[in-house]
Image: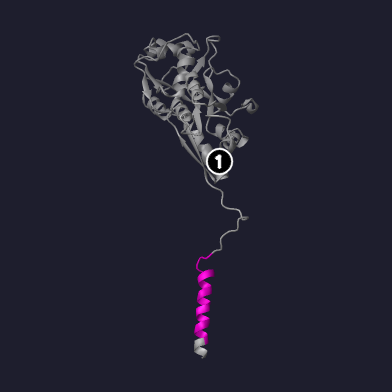
Amino acid sequence: MDTMRRFRLFLLVCALLTFTGCGYRPSPSPDEPTETAVQYLENKGSDTIVNLALAWAERYQKINPQVRISVTGGGSGTGLTALINGTVDIANASRSIKQEELDAARSAGYDPREFVIARDAIAVIVHPSNPVDRLTLQELSLIYKGEIKNWSELGGEDREIVRLSRETNSGTHVYFLESVIRMGDPDDESIFSADTLLLPSSEGIIAEVKDNPNAIGYDSLGYITEDVKLIAVSSIEQPDVYILPSLETVNDNSYLISRNLFMYTLEDPVGVVKDYMDWILSPEAQQIVQELGFIPVINSEDQP
């Protein structure tokens, strides 16, 4: 009898363990909080901005682990096209949206919003061994139009100039064409010399200039390394005053070849997109801008 009682007690204990010790959990009541759903953001565009955008995404995801941000490059035009097609939430651009892009968005029923998220200088670079260390804006224009062909015409050695540029879908390419080659003249239809080598990335420009004593290139200040030499540039108005690009010379507008960097959304951002854009214009995010060699937005109150 005692044996039977002990056996029944053993069965009861096993039954209790099945419910309490082997993973059973009661269903949560409707009033209990549930885990926050993961939210996804797609961000695409300018290769100038891609490293900055990746750094922002990494930091923001640490602060907000329920948000996942995918960042890809491909060029300003590629990002804006993806935005208009509705395949990304935010487009990065190193130039302003073009009128035809704006018209396409409005034809699709959208009204894009522009955000200035940083400033940048376009640095002109040569090989460290090149004795030329300063150029006027007009000389740069003539170089890239193919009218100045040899470094000896600029006080350098008797070497053919090798011109380097970003590809045509790059916002940096467009900016350099309009602001340097055409010197800001909207009626000027000059283009890059046909023998200009088009490279797909900022890193490619740096690598080629580093290895080629005859090369000249241009790149975002945030990508410049000690392997290349910066060229001081003078304006048409002050041809004898040559300025190197830096945070200070961009902020005081003394360096001529500088620009805003942008992010675009299809409409006024809401929800997770708005939260992210607000954070990008915060002191924490703008500190990352400076750490990566770009210029923080000084007057954030000017943002739309």
Give the number of callouts: 1
Seen at 49% across and 84% down, the residue is: 7
Residue 132 in picture, x, y percent from top left:
44, 17
Q: Residue furthest right?
A: 301
Tell me: residue 168, above or below residue 55. Answer: above
Q: Is residue 103 magenta?
A: no
Tell me: residue 61, above or below residue 296. Answer: below
- Left or right? Give the position of 200 relative to 289: left
Residue 198 seen in this snapshot: yes
Residue 155 seen in this snapshot: no
Q: Which residue is mark 1?
A: 60
Q: Amino acid at mark 1?
A: Tyr
Q: Is residue 17 magenta?
A: yes
Coloration mode: one colour
Mark 1, secondary structure of its residue: helix
Seen at 58% across and 53% down, the residue is: 34
Seen at 35% across and 15% down, the residue is: 194
Seen at 51% across and 81% down, the residue is: 10
In the depicted view, which residue is nearer to us: 165 or 32? 32
Residue 150 in picture, x, y percent from top left:
37, 13
Residue 245 in picture, x, y percent from top left:
53, 22
In the depicted view, which residue is nearer to us: 191 or 24? 24
Q: Main secondary structure of the magenta part?
A: helix
In the depicted view, which residue is nearer to us: 87 or 199? 87
**Magenta stretch?**
5-24
Q: Residue furthest bottom?
A: 1
Label 1: few (<14), some (14–19) or many (≥20) C-alpha neighbours in 10 Å:
some
Residue 280 in picture, x, y percent from top left:
58, 34
Quarter of the image for the C terminus: give it. top right
